Image (tube, rainbow, N blue to C red):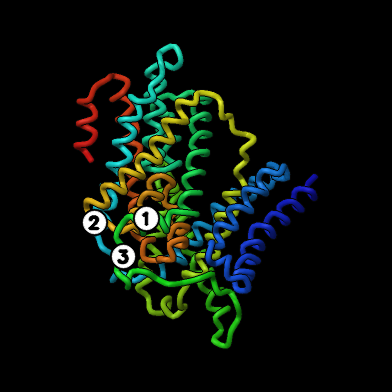
Amino acid sequence: MLYNNVLQVVASMVYLFGVPLAVILLARKWTFINKISPMMVLYCIGLLVGNVGIVNSVVSATCESVSNITVLVAIPLMLICCDFKVWSAKKLAKAFFTGFASVMIVILAGFFIFRPDEGTMATEAYAKVSAVMTGIYTGGIPNIGAISKAVGMPNDLYLLVTSYDLIITGLYLIFVIFFGKAVFRKLLPLQEKKDVADFETPDLQIDKENRFWKKVLAVCVALIVAAVSYAVSLIVPIDNNVAVIVLLITTLSLALSLSKPVKRLGNTFDLGLYFVYVFCLSIATMVNVHDLKLLENMYILYYIAFTVFGSLLLQILFAKIFRIDGDTVLVSSVALINSPPFVPMVAAILKNRDVVITGIAIGLIGYAIGNYLGVGIYFTFWFNSFFVTIITFSVF
């Protein structure tokens, strides 16, 4: 039994790290892969593998572990080569507040549009759904555990909401991966030319300049940053360790980006992109549509879909009013809807390394206030008191 499990773990690791490398190498030979994006290819491969019945609990656990580790390695690699000259605090503030306002407006509106009869679901239970959704789409998945406990959400309702969220955010990510870049750059202003970093697939080959060993050293630096951040997070007395880890990784990586020895490692973004590819393949492989119950309480599914895609449309409208560029809007939307670990994936799609800092910063702000807003929304709807809403929004 143990031998079987070890064999499955090894095979899963070969699949998760080997397939992205194979796609990268094929992209050099077949240019159409670069045109449609290697990430799209990997996403499709992962969905196919995840739904043909060969992914068991051991493989799924391996995918989850790999996804958690690779994203922590990808963030430092993509940040230590960032240039502060292209970062704008003003743009960050506009992107966050327009994204945040968009999510909160549609959650408030959706509560009344999709509210079921008392015989179907009590108002209190439905208020708990809104509370958890607020935490997810302003703070991220790590916040929903705290909010669900704070409002007393039953386990079956919790599983139902998170299952529906998986469906809708999966569709949202498909839109982002396949159409996001073209749509947002078409509808919204472009960044200045100097802001956009042009890169193709990662270059992992050995050359005369010892590039291979520089990349090995860069990975070691990223692993050290991730390990230190994780170790420090263990002594911080809060439940949401993910927020602490991401914040520490971001801070340490940005500090290292100012170091001349680290700068000599060259462009580490392309290597970080490889780990993002592994992350995406891991996530896609874990999605099994056969395990999801699609026909129960569909009004919750509609509410979630309205929130995710409605906030996206509203954010585009606000961005046109405040003249925010398409890349920044897309990365801020993903940071709020899917949380900071997905930001490097969007940067890879956009081929723009300079949105990584903005996206992670927006996601971290959402982490910080998501729990408060979720509980505030619950009391607002449960007690039908818009006075609570006014207080909640005044605080933030």
Tell me, for residue 323, which label it has, or none: 2
Between label 1 and label 3, give the one nearer the viewer. Answer: 1
Q: Image height check: is 115 above or below 24?
A: above
Q: CA distance from mark 2 to mark 3?
A: 11 Å
Disc 1, SS: helix
Q: Which residue is mark 3?
A: 191
Disc 2, SS: loop
Task: Name the amino acid, label 2.
Answer: Arg
Task: Name the amino acid, label 1.
Answer: Phe
Identified at 44% across, 80% down, the residue is: 264
The part of the image, by quadrant, that contains residue 252 is bottom left
Q: Which residue is mark 1?
A: 184
Disc 3, SS: loop
| Residue 210 appears in the picture as rendered | yes
Q: Position of residue 267 (x, y in %)?
A: 46, 75
Category of crowding for the residue at label 1, using alpha-carbon neighbours closer than 10 angstroms: few (below 14), some (14–19), many (at least 20): some
Q: Image height check: is 225 above or below 332?
A: below
Q: Relative to the observer, which residue lies in front, 25 or 268?
A: 25
Upstream in the sequence, badge 2 or badge 3?
A: 3
Category of crowding for the residue at label 3, using alpha-carbon neighbours closer than 10 angstroms: few (below 14), some (14–19), many (at least 20): some
